[in-house]
Image: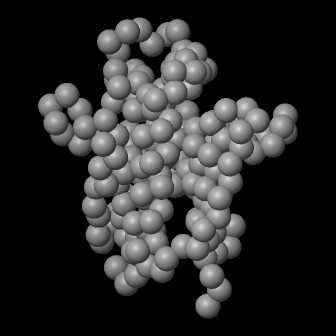
Amino acid sequence: MAKRFLQIFRDGEAGKHIALSEPLLDGEQGNIQTLSVMAEIVRADRLKADLRRLVLKTIVGDDVKGHDFKGEIEKLFYFAQKKICYRKDPVQVERVMDVWTTLFGTESDQSYKPEGDCGIKAVFLASCLALLGHKPVFVVIKQDKNANSFNHVYNGYIDEAGKVKYLDPTPEDKPIGYEPKSYSKFLVPIF
């Protein structure tokens, strides 16, 4: 069996690109390993004031007024759904990226368009939610009852009443609140 790798892109700031590759464990252990790195990226990104300004200016925009938390969440969700093109990861590789790398790529390539799989979209959306004061979680599911690992990740957030609201930006035609069919599901807290 070919060895699998977890490829981690942490650009964060122009000129400080970091890409790490480490062996990825098999099955659910590999899921846990990946989710741990994803949560670490979200916790780090939410502390960056310049990233918050970028998200507010370029994604949320001026038309969403203060205290319009639903409007913020909708803008973030639809950006992740419509502006980050779904692309599968390379064979035997699980990629995760911070917000900066997702938006601008790993090189100075003016033609780069944001792209990634469900994990990249989930980290992006969770980081943006956390930057704006919302409490995100990852939702991990098995869509095949015979699978030895979870095969899809998306987002949730804890609302003011303490309830989880779901956000799956991977399907390009599903609304906020949609949840795909699953045989097994669990929530992964980030904070």
Residue in the foreground of this view, choosing between 48 and 104: 48
- The chosen color scheme is one colour
The quarter holding residue 67 reads: top left
Confirm whether residue 160 shows in the render. yes
Looking at the image, the residue that sits furthest to the bottom is 1
- Please name the residue shown 45% across and 48% down the image: 40
- Please name the residue shown 35% across and 26% down the image: 133
When the figure is inspected, residue 31 is found, relative to residue 148, above or below; the finding is above
Residue in the foreground of this view, choosing between 36 and 140: 36
Residue 102 drawn at (x, y percent): 64, 42
Residue 126 drawn at (x, y percent): 43, 40
Residue in the foreground of this view, choosing between 30 and 47: 47
Quarter of the figure with the C terminus: top left
On the rendered structure, is 131 left or right of 69?
Answer: right
When the figure is inspected, residue 27 is found, relative to residue 137, above or below; the finding is below
On the rendered structure, is 131 left or right of 70?
Answer: right
Residue 159 drawn at (x, y percent): 23, 32
Confirm whether residue 166 shows in the render. no
When the figure is inspected, residue 170 is found, relative to residue 183, above or below; the finding is above
Looking at the image, the residue that sits furthest to the left is 161
Quarter of the figure with the N terminus: bottom right
- Please name the residue shown 84% across and 39% down the image: 109
On the rendered structure, is 95 left or right of 112?
Answer: left
How many marks do you count on the picture?
0
